[in-house]
Amino acid sequence: MWTKVARQALTALEKLERAGYESYLVGGCVRDLLRGETPHDADLTTIALPEQTKAVFADRHVIETGIKHGTVTVVLDGVPLEITTFRTEGTYSDGRHPDEVQFSRTLREDLRRRDFTVNAMAMSPRTGVVDPYGGMQDLQNKVIRCVGDPRERFSEDALRILRAARFASTLDFEIEEETARAMLELTPLLAKVSAERVSAEFINLLCGAGAQRVLTEFRELVAFIVPEIRESFGFPQQNKHHCYDVYTHTVCAVSYIPPEPVLRLAAFFHDIGKPRAYHIGENGRGSFRGHSQVGEQIARDVMHRLKFSNAIIRDVCVLVREHDYLLQNEHGALRLLQRLPNDLLDPLMHLMRADALAKASPQESLQKVETLRDGLLELIRQSPALHVSDLAIDGKQLIALGVPEGKSVGTMLEYLLEQVIDGKAQNTTESLAQCVLKIVDKK
């Protein structure tokens, strides 16, 4: 259970204690140990002042990470450990950071400033677990509860609102009633939090075991982060394939897809364009033709706003755009494979399966997805060319055949690929050269 990080943390504790300074493991490391999980990082808190901590570890590499707030980072055997002096905090005028920090002489005061009871426990070999605010009980009951007044905790640091939702999802815990009420009441305070911090918490929330429940119970919080999703709340689909409104279908799909960032984001956004694309046909049934393209643009706008990486934005947008293509274009498999990066075929199948599982007749829909998957794999095996790089002719050969250098070469390669895909030319150098000469000779 003890990783290298945790072992080095114990070494640091022992060294501080031998020097006469009361010290403890604190926060998430303690929570994970008590849950029987392996901690992968560790924070320490100590009565030693930063200069005293530096003196204890004078023979080690010490980084003054946040020394004015009482934190230094000690590197032991390549493991960085943040060690913070017991402290209390003043007002939070910006809703994110304390205006001032005062060092404390007691562990209890230090723990009182922390966000949730399950994160407000400390432990050491000398004392065992120190739990003044009921964290162990909440851990056993699987409850997220603020330390003290939740409105005060969230008003101090608005990010805690999203952290509560994230912990409820990743730990699969319930949120205590007063804490939940304060979260929803103070959600607008999240406007003070940077987009980067919001996106980091949101993706962890989406990837948690309790994501479906949290997305459902705290949909107003979700809508503050992604206002565009509000249009799907309660939106009826009026379609024989669906038994849920758009938002309920969405959160079900999220729960059915593997907990990987790109996959969960794709599931979250895959039908976000439906309300804007909705129309009722002559038969009285609802239709969402074109919703994938609408959803792709919404997803791109949202993810840019939340400052996701370009790589994540690119992959999620491709999956959202293509998730419904084969169901609407039964003979477009080759076109799909031509557009789809090779590494996104499996993710697309995951998304289509999750989408199917969240429908009225999942087994029927799943069978269709599996048939499509088998067909795509067979096409990949048989296809003579899917991309320009697969052609049996290259740019140099085209120039030798009389194609002008520059953009004309790329245009010709795209044309030849179309000819091969449409079955109008074979993917051989001779066949493609004949296609080229027909065009060059005309000019």
Image (cartoon, helix red, strand yellow):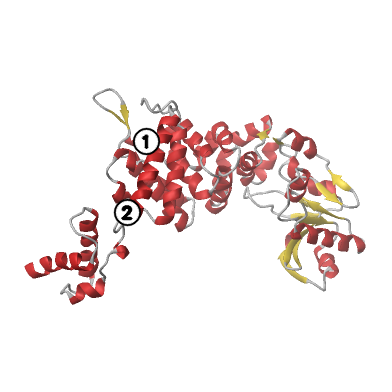
Q: Which residue is mark 1?
A: 274
Location of residue 16 (image quadrant): bottom right
Q: Secondary structure at mark 1?
A: helix
**Residue 94 x, y percent position in the rendering:** 62, 50
Q: Is residue 187 above or below residue 40?
A: above
Q: Please tell me which residue lies in front, 340 or 146.
A: 340
- In the image, taking residue 181 as reference, residue 277 lies left or right, namely left
Could you tell me residue 144's position as x and y percent?
Answer: 69, 37
The amino acid pointed to by label 1 is: Lys
In the drawing, what numbered circle is on residue 149?
none
Q: Tell me the crowding category of disc 1: few under 14, some 14 to 19, or many 20 or more residues within 10 angstroms, Cα based.
A: many
In depth, the one of 101 and 350 nearer the eye is 350
Give the CA separation, mark 1 to mark 2: 35 Å
- Left/right placement of residue 297 relative to residue 72 reads left
Q: Amino acid at mark 2?
A: Gln
Q: Seen in the image, is 249 located left or right of residue 118?
A: left
- Count of labels in the image: 2
For this orientation, the residue located farthest to the top is 284
Q: Is residue 47 above or below residue 276?
A: below
Q: Is residue 137 in view from this perspective?
A: yes
Residue 61, horizontal then vertical, whole percent: 76, 72
Badge number at residue 382: 2
Closer-to-camera residue (88/83): 83
Q: Residue furthest bottom?
A: 400
